[in-house]
Amino acid sequence: MQQREEKQLESALDSIIQRVNDLKTSIAAMIYKVENEYETLNWPTFLDNFALLSGHLTSLSKILSHDKCPVLRNLTVLPLMLSPERDEQLAQLTEHRVTTFAHDLVPDYLRTKLEPLAENKMMQLEHKAATVAYENAQKQVAAYQKVVTHIWDIVSKAREEWDVESSARGNAQQHSSVSDTHLLVTAVGMGKGLKPVPNANGQPGQPAGSMMVAPQGRPGSASGQGQIPPATQTMTMNKAPSAIKTNIKSATQIHPYGR
Amino acid sequence: MHDGGKATRVIGIRSAEQVLTKNMTTPDSAKDSLTSALNSNIIPNREYLLQGSVVDQYVEVLLHRLRGLCDNVDDGAETFYDHEMCFSLCMNSSGNPLVFPLRVRRALDAQDAPYQLRYIGQQELGDKNRPTIVRSSIDVACSASIVEFLQELGCRLDFEYTARGYMFRKGRMKITVSKICKCGGGNKPGENIELISQSYLVELSVLAPSGYDAIAEDMRVFAEQLKPLVHLEKIDYKRL
């Protein structure tokens, strides 16, 4: 039973130490940056560093609040031996920050309470809170609550507006349509949809000033289209002569230019 | 002019000589200089082109962005209203019909501006690495009688349309945002106008001598800045 607990404690301590070391190295990197690159450092990289730190802190607090982590509060660290002599092992462990495990340093390093200054301040505040009358305290709490709810309302309202805006933007993504692009490009490039429509005579309705018929163009295109049909015509003639024949004819009339 | 010092007189005589020799040899030298210009590849006869469109209701947003991106910041966008007639000359040489397209463009909003005659060649799409369409383009300014001339030549009016819109420039790049309308049955363009789409045609083009492919890369970068409002792409309309 005790063995298992010890093992658990050891593994938890290991992971905590690892996280703390991560935190330490990133803090060191940040300090280095601030001290050495303050001329070229920009806000985005600085904030990136902060994000890194906060990530490390979050993972550390996650480990501390994990189920498997033993309650460290219940454990006691007891200094068994104090010595004014220099301790090489200790110096190595602490990167030469602490060289002796002596009576003047130990109370500071093994302190589990708040810092003296902070402790004093807390005491004062607690004392002040204790002296305030109950009604007064209630009033203050109510006023504070009111302020907080008001700010909460403002924030949630702004968030709602942003949500609506961003969703509207998501819906309005359609700034251009591919089919319209193709329509316009083919129209400008080839005249698709712009060519004069054939009128009742089957002749294309020519806009004013364009009646000139290219004499050599017409037979050329006509023969170009006419060269292939005869074979099909004779083939299909036996089956359904009239219908097919008129079909071909009307098709050539729709595209008189053979393009 | 010849009253001046000796030096000026000498210069004057020399320049007169030059003019004389130039005038005497004009037919040949014009052809020669054209050939040499062609050989030294300084004629901007290649058009690099990207095309796209924008829906009517977002055209203001696009224009706003273009105003910010392009060079004509002070005077805003230049507007234009053009009528384009596309002729084709069918040549039936040795059995295979050859269609030779020619385009005449005139400004409807500036009646005294010259007409523009333009030949546009087959578009080359190239492979994926080439960012734009490339096509031959030769254009020349001419007078209003060009239409009659072309018809006498045997050209046939294939189709015509009007384009009304805005023009921007950025360095050597030209960006047009225009509404394409079909010309109605009326004698004059402008009557019976018929919109063919609910979108504006957007074109990004550069005229450059052949081989100036670096400009295509600039165009790709510029087109990238107009996304997602307009997707300027190389479109093979022959396949559509």
Image (cartoon, coloured by chain):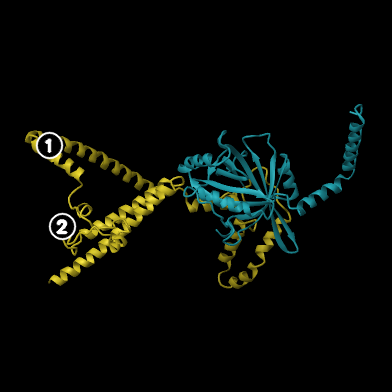
Q: Chain of mark 2?
A: A
Q: Is residue A242 above or below residue B103?
A: below
A231 on left or right of B151: left
Label 1 packing within 10 angstroms: few (<14), some (14-19), many (20+): few
Callouts 1 and 2 in the same chain? yes
Q: Is residue A213 above or below residue A88?
A: above
Which kind of residue does numbered mark 1 sit on?
A: Lys
User: Looking at the image, which residue is at 11% across and 39% down?
Assistant: A127
The quarter of the picture where the C terminus of chain B appears is bottom right
Residue A239 rendering spot, x and y as whole percentages: 56, 72
The quarter of the picture where the N terminus of chain B appears is top right
Pick the front one: A186 or A169: A169
Pick the front one: B214 or B25: B214
Which kind of residue does numbered mark 2 sit on?
A: Arg
User: Looking at the image, which residue is at 18% across and 53% down?
Assistant: A112
Q: Which residue is mark 2?
A: A73
Residue farthest toward the left in the current orientation of the protein: A134
Q: Is residue B221 visible?
A: yes
The chain painted yellow is A
Q: Chain of mark 1?
A: A
Residue farthest toward the front in the current orientation of the protein: A85
The chain painted cyan is B
The picture quadrant where one finds residue B171 is: top right
Distance, label 1 to label 2, CA atoms, is 28 Å
The picture quadrant where one finds residue B233 is: bottom right
Query: Looking at the image, do the residues carrying marks 1 and 2 touch, with CB atoms under 8 Å apart?
Result: no
Q: Which residue is mark 1?
A: A128
Q: Is residue A201 visible?
A: no
Q: Earlier in the sequence, mark 1 or mark 2?
A: 2
Label 2 packing within 10 angstroms: few (<14), some (14-19), many (20+): few
